[in-house]
Image: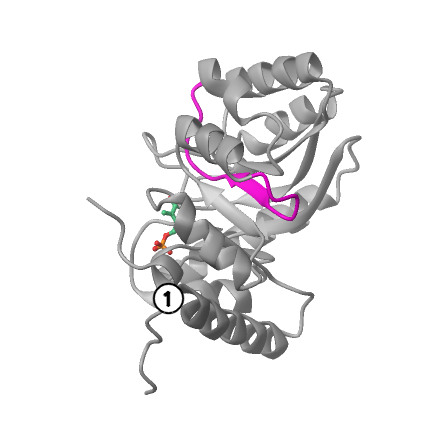
Amino acid sequence: MSAVPDTIAGRAAAILERIDAAARAAGGGPVRLVAVSKLHPAAAIEAALAAGLTDFGENYAQELEAKRAAITDARVRWHMIGPVQSNKAKRVVGCALVQTLDRPSLLTALDRRAREANVVQAVLVQVNVAGEAGKSGVSPAELPALLDGVAACEALRCAGLMLIPEMGPPEALRRQFRALRRLRDAEAATSRPRVELHELSMGMSDDFELAIAEGATLVRIGTAIFGARAP
Ligand SMILES: *Cc1c(COP(=O)(O)O)cnc(C)c1O
């Protein structure tokens, strides 16, 4: 095995190569890298930008808002990938993609804030494919109603689905990735205004190649690019 490069630019290039190889092996469309910059300073994002990365994922509404204010490079596309409290919806509206729409109350809050800001907000619906209580994401049973909800909101557009899997061995992860893709395929058969389910956001530092093999179009990678996060 080759050594892991010790710069952000070197690690980013190595990850992009692995994404590309996995995407070619899967024979699907292009796969976009979302570099997860949560808890890393603006200087790390600047280094990744200089290395050609443009999509960045943040988990905390306040940190996202602060980084959007600090880094104004027009190439940057911000992704909200953490849970959003409804009273923080205003802080995340205006980013490229809110990946964690997971309940009707957040739908209502995002739609209201997007209308106030006079923007159309792109979202993904986060799904809890196992349907376990206490986990974030809508259950598969609740997914159609939430998509109907997006279809009724003028200021929202749904671009696809997002998954944070339960940890487990590769076969268990593969089952969850496949379950998300099947849900997408099933829901894509229903035509809804403002809903086009082309994106599947799944796969992180340790499992992105498996996710790409199962149809991921967006992978969210933090540690393998930026190194360990401060505790
Ligand atoms: C932190 C985080 C990631 C990145 O995880 P790594 O293991 O550091 O690649 C991806 N997705 C979500 C939702 C996260 O919170």
Check disc 1 and report the residue beneath it: 171
Q: Secondary structure at mark 1?
A: helix
Secondary structure mostly seen in the magenta stretch:
loop
Disc 1 crowd rating (10 Å Cα; few below 14, some 14-19, many 20+) is: few
Viewer-side residue, 105 vs 131: 105
Q: How is the image coloured?
A: one colour
Q: From the top left corner, tell me how far across and down residue 37 is, in percent.
A: 41, 47
Left or right, 18 with reference to 8: right
Q: Is residue 222 above or below residue 157?
A: below
Residue 98 colored in magenta in the image:
no
Tell me where residue 66 sits by quadrant. top left
Q: Residue 5: in sight, yes or no?
A: yes
In this orientation, does residue 101 appear?
no
Q: What amino acid type should be assigned to the residue bearing mark 1?
A: Glu
Residue 154 location (% of width, % of height): 76, 20
* Name of the residue lying farthest toward the left: 231
Determine the image quadrant of residue 10. bottom left
In the image, residue 169 above or below residue 69: below
Q: Nearer the viewer, residue 65 or 104?
A: 65
Q: Residue at x 46, y 18 (%)?
A: 88
Give the image location of residue 130, x and y in percent.
40, 43
Which residue occupies 67% across, 65% down?
Answer: 30
> Which residue: 62% across, 25% down?
145
**Number of numbered discs overlaid on the protein picture:** 1
Q: Is residue 198 left or right of residue 50?
A: right
Q: Which residues are magenta?
A: 72-85
Quadrant into which the N terminus falls = bottom left
- The answer to whether 81 is drawn above or below residue 13 in the figure is above
- Residue 174 in picture, x, y percent from top left: 43, 62
Figure quadrant of the C terminus: top left
Q: Which residue occupies 61% across, 44% down? A: 73
